[in-house]
Amino acid sequence: MFTSTGSSGLYKAPLSKSLLLVPSALSLLLALLLPHCQKFFLYDLQAVKDDFQIWRLICGRIICLDLKDTFCSSLLIYNFRIFERRFGSRKFASFLLGSWVLSAFFDFILVEALQYSFGITTASNLPSGFLAPVFALFVPFYCSIPRVQVAQILGQFSITNKTLIYILGLQLFTSGSYIWIVAISGLISGMCYNSRVLKIHQVLCIPSWMAKLFSWTLEPIFSSSEPTSEARIGMGATVDIQRQQRMELLDRQLTLSQFAHARRQRQRQGGMINWNRLFPPLRQQRSVNYQDDRPSEQQASPPLEASEEQDEYKRKTEKQQK
């Protein structure tokens, strides 16, 4: 179901594991045991603007109060753990931090635009949770993960390795009345952070000293052990080298599948006329001509043998006459 570019599980993805465990546990705790404390985690932009409750920009954008949003976002974070393995925990955390900060700014802009244009004041109560960075991760997912066709329905609709992820994102997009504002702000913040022109990644990033501090304190808590049930591919001396060879093999397979898909599209765009049938390739023509020439040589060889026998007969007769 999910895209995979390496080991299964959460090996070498401590940040993704912490985002799966901590917010989900707090969301269950607030929904089942502490429902009276949910008011402190509401994402109310009107209270931020009128009452200067700035703390809601932090508390209201970390924990999901809807368990359905918690489940969908957890599945997406588990799938997007591949970016932490590719880029490293520091770069992955910097992307989440940058998109999280930028999305708060875009939330204000979209809500004010709705209130000014259509007079919708209830749009200030947005869904709570760590949702905008999850939608922002769809930007590198769309740009860097190649499409591989898995199946085809009715000969026209193709199912790829990314189809179910987009369906899950669409489910999260339509789970609430105003969650589309958070989704759009997350996508815009992801595009802004992923753009090399704006260079936001140089400003909103995790410092090296903070990354070392978290690697010493929190990484041992959320780190996962190496998977032992994986099939070893390659002849690497260590498990890391074998895993790198497995990733290179998968990238090679993805490249070949893209090449085959592009080749099929070119054949479909060629029209209904099979030009190879009308004009066969030169290699086939040469092979046919070569096969046609061989029987002619074999047929021409018997007269040569007959002429040699005649010469020998003439020599014998001349000797007998002498």
Image: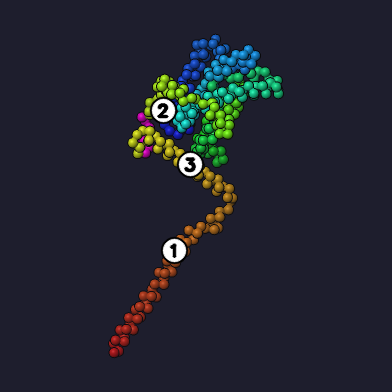
Measuring 43% from the left and 38% from the top, which residue is drawn there? 248
Main secondary structure found in the magenta portion: loop
Q: Where is mark 3, residue-wise?
A: 255
Q: Amino acid at mark 3?
A: Thr
Distance Cα–Cα, label 1 vs label 3: 38 Å
Measuring 60% from the left and 26% from the top, which residue is drawn there? 185
Distance Cα–Cα, label 1 vs label 2: 60 Å
Q: Where is mark 1, residue-wise?
A: 291
Measuring 51% from the left and 35% from the top, which residue is drawn there? 144
Placement of 280 over or under 120, stated as above or below: below
Q: Earlier in the sequence, mark 2 or mark 3?
A: 2
Can residue 137 be seen?
no
Quarter that holds the C terminus? bottom left
Q: Earlier in the sequence, mark 1 or mark 2?
A: 2
Measuring 61% from the left and 23% from the top, which residue is drawn there? 105
Can residue 234 be seen?
yes
* Residue range highlighted in magenta: 228-234
Secondary element at image label 3: helix
Secondary element at image label 2: loop
Badge number at residue 11? 2
Question: Residue 34, how many percent across, how many down?
Answer: 51, 11
